[in-house]
Image (cartoon, rainbow, N blue to C red):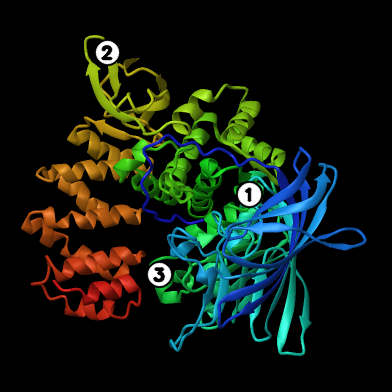
């Protein structure tokens, strides 16, 4: 799921949220649903096949929030037996009439009405985003379609069908949806049957035979056009409002390629029967990885013009990657949510790396790192944490962005071959099961033959990140390069890290790489060197999630920009040179960065143009005009236009701005309408 924002204060008392205890498990859920669109009610029959987990049981407790329960029966082999139950508005306590062992199954039939729209915020649910099922009603609003859709994560599906809110459970399902014949339905699994009824309705039957967690169950109903693709022998489909359906392949068309790439990279083929993606109105999150049927917010209702600014391709990759990490293998508790979300976030990086190259992927990874580092509070939170006040608090930059960067560091630590072999082992061993963080560690240890507790303890099971101070020098008397490193994070609240790093020494056309391990608070590393290197590049692979303070000279920064092989080399160099704009050589590189191959660096360079002396600003004026029209990235074009309308407003920009007016990217149009 895409990140959500929740405002809740952790209580003063100690809290531990472990995995839910399991007394009874649901093996299969069969729902038969109709809808009262006027009252926003769900009229349902739920048939649940349940079974004791281990110990004999004579009762079961189901989650069902705000229901009207009409009757509950046990469906024995020869009879339908009415059961006694009590209901407090949130949980149904059902007496089964006898004790059942773990070898026996019970079929329960529950006749109910769910009223998710009647749930009171603060009493029945924590926020309006927790209703679970949403009726989107036109209510005389022009352009608002009638729709119905669900959002189950974390524990909201119990607001529209009776279940057990436990991520450890895995069940198969069948869902019958009776809707107006003019509407389209979507659910998990395959559409097995459509029956046309005499009252103008149609009953669609969706079946998913492979088991998944209850929070991943979904339904959607509305007037959608369905655009179909295929991956191997499986249907890939895009459900969109008719006005946006012509652009479905522009928005989602890379999905089959993603399916093939992820299947091959992981060594585990996409495991579900189909893959559908649907865009709905007023969705409560960015997107949700419901098994075989992902839901997306209505910003994905795009045109070719809006696609120029944001493709949301990362979200498409994120939700798809969840179908291995989250759907096939599921975190056993919300405390272990990073096993779902960190992987989905890293799936974005893997796709970018495959499709657009390492430069684009590293740019994406940088944004993840900056998102985590931007909030001071994030440094106080463990990645795997059991003390949250509300499970929704787990959906943050720690579970997503920090976790994704940790997986990248793990990949760099063990190497590509071991990394992906361990992921394959993890997925195959735990398919259709739930997991905790140690299952991941054990998979990596089984593949590498190494004890990796040190890595998992400092990154997944602790808070914070390194604050690294780097000092480099050359000892002419000993002919040695000296690298002095110091970890200056608060060791009362954060670990003393073990950091395997690479140090690159640049000598003209030759680069020497020196591997080091920093496992002390302070350490000094010396390397024999007949001459002074032009650049000493610590963390040469730029993989470390850390705040780093470095003492590079102006010449070293310039050399790093000109000769560093990575996007991050150039990004760091421009960032440091921007603090030295009083130096002509620093300004020369900033101007050169206007033509950098990475659009983010070009955008950075534009942001520093106003710091140049007036004559130098005029010297780059022709380049700014060119960028306003020709840069391949709309945000860069927009930024250049803003410069033309501000620091270059006295120049004759009429022709350029007139031509730019034909650029229909929203960011460009906004820049053109901005006031100087």
In the image, residue 71 sits, relative to residue 181, either above or below, namely above
Q: Residue at x 11, y 65 (%)?
A: 647
List the single residue furthest toward the top: 478
Q: Position of residue 240 (x, y in %)?
A: 56, 76
Q: CA distance from mark 3 to mark 2?
A: 54 Å
Q: Residue at x 63, y 32 (%)?
A: 443
Assign a secondary structure to mark 3.
loop
- Give the residue pinned by disc 3: 308
Assign a secondary structure to mark 2.
loop
- Give the residue pinned by disc 1: 324
Q: Position of residue 41 (x, y in %)?
A: 59, 75
In the image, residue 551 sits, relative to residue 126, either above or below, namely above
Tell me if residue 441 can be seen.
yes
Circle number at residue 379? none
Instruction: Give whichever of discs 3 and 2 has the lower sequence position.
Output: 3
Name the residue nearer the viewer: 305 or 19.
Answer: 19
């Amino acid at each position: 799921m895409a990140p959500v924002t929740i405002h809740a204060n952790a209580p003063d008392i100690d809290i531990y949220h472990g995995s839910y205890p399991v007394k009874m498990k649901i093996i299969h859920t069969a729902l038969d649903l109709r809808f009262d669109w006027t009252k926003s009610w769900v009229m349902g029959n739920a048939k649940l096949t349940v079974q004791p987990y281990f110990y004999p049981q004579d009762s079961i407790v189901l989650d069902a929030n705000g229901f009207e329960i009409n009757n509950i029966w046990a469906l024995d082999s020869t009879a339908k037996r009415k059961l006694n139950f009590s209901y407090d508005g949130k949980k149904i306590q059902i007496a089964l009439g006898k004790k059942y062992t773990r070898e026996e199954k019970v079929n329960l039939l529950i006749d109910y009405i769910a009223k998710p729209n009647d749930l009171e915020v603060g009493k029945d649910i924590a926020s309006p985003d927790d209703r679970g099922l949403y009726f989107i009603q036109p209510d005389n609003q022009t352009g608002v379609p009638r729709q119905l859709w669900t959002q189950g994560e974390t524990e909201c599906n119990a607001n529209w069908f009776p279940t057990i809110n436990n991520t450890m459970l895995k069940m198969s399902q069948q869902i019958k949806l009776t809707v107006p014949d003019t509407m389209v339905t979507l659910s998990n699994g395959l559409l097995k049957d459509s029956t046309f009824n005499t009252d103008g309705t149609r009953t669609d039957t969706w079946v998913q035979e492979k088991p998944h967690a209850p929070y991943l169950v979904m339904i959607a109903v509305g007037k959608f056009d369905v655009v179909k693709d295929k991956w191997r022998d499986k249907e890939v489909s895009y459900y969109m409002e008719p006005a946006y359906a012509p652009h479905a392949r522009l928005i989602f068309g890379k999905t089959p390629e993603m399916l093939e790439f992820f299947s091959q990279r992981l060594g585990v083929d996409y495991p579900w029967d189909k893959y559908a993606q649907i865009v709905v109105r007023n969705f409560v999150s960015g997107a949700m990885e419901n098994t075989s049927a992902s839901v997306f917010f209505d910003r994905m209702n795009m045109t070719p013009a809006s696609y120029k600014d944001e493709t949301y391709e990362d979200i498409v990759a994120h939700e798809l990657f969840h179908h291995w990490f989250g759907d096939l293998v599921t975190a056993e508790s919300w405390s272990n949510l990073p096993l779902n979300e960190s992987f989905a976030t890293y799936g974005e990086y893997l796709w970018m790396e495959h499709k657009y190259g390492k430069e684009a992927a590293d740019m994406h990874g940088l944004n993840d790192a900056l998102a985590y580092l931007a909030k001071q509070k994030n440094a106080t939170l463990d990645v795997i944490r059991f003390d949250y006040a509300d499970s929704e608090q787990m959906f943050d930059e720690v579970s997503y962005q920090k976790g994704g960067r940790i997986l990248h560091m793990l990949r760099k630590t063990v190497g590509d071959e071991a990394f992906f072999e361990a992921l394959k082992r993890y997925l195959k061993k735990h398919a259709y099961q739930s997991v905790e963080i140690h299952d991941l560690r054990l998979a990596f240890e089984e593949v590498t033959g190494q004890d990796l507790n040190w890595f998992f303890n400092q990154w997944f099971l602790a808070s914070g990140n390194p604050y690294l101070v780097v000092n480099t020098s050359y000892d002419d008397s000993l002919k040695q390069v000296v690298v002095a490193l110091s970890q200056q994070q608060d060791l009362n609240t954060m670990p003393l890290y073990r950091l395997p790093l690479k140090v690159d020494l640049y000598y003209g056309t030759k680069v020497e790489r020196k591997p080091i391990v920093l496992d002390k608070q302070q350490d000094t590393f010396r390397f024999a060197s007949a001459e002074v290197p032009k650049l000493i590049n610590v963390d040469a692979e730029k993989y470390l999630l850390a705040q780093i303070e470095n003492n590079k000279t102006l010449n070293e920064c310039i050399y790093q920009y000109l000769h560093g092989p990575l996007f991050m080399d150039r990004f760091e160099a421009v960032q440091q040179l921007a603090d030295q704009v009083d130096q002509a050589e620093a300004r020369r590189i900033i101007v050169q960065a206007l033509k950098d191959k990475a659009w983010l660096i070009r955008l950075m360079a534009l942001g520093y143009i106003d710091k140049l002396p007036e004559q130098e600003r005029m010297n780059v004026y022709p380049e700014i005009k060119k960028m306003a029209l020709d840069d391949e990235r709309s945000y860069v074009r927009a930024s250049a236009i803003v410069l033309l309308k501000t620091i270059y407003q006295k120049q004759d920009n009429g022709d350029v701005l007139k031509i730019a007016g034909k650029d229909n990217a929203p960011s460009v149009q906004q820049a053109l309408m901005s006031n100087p």
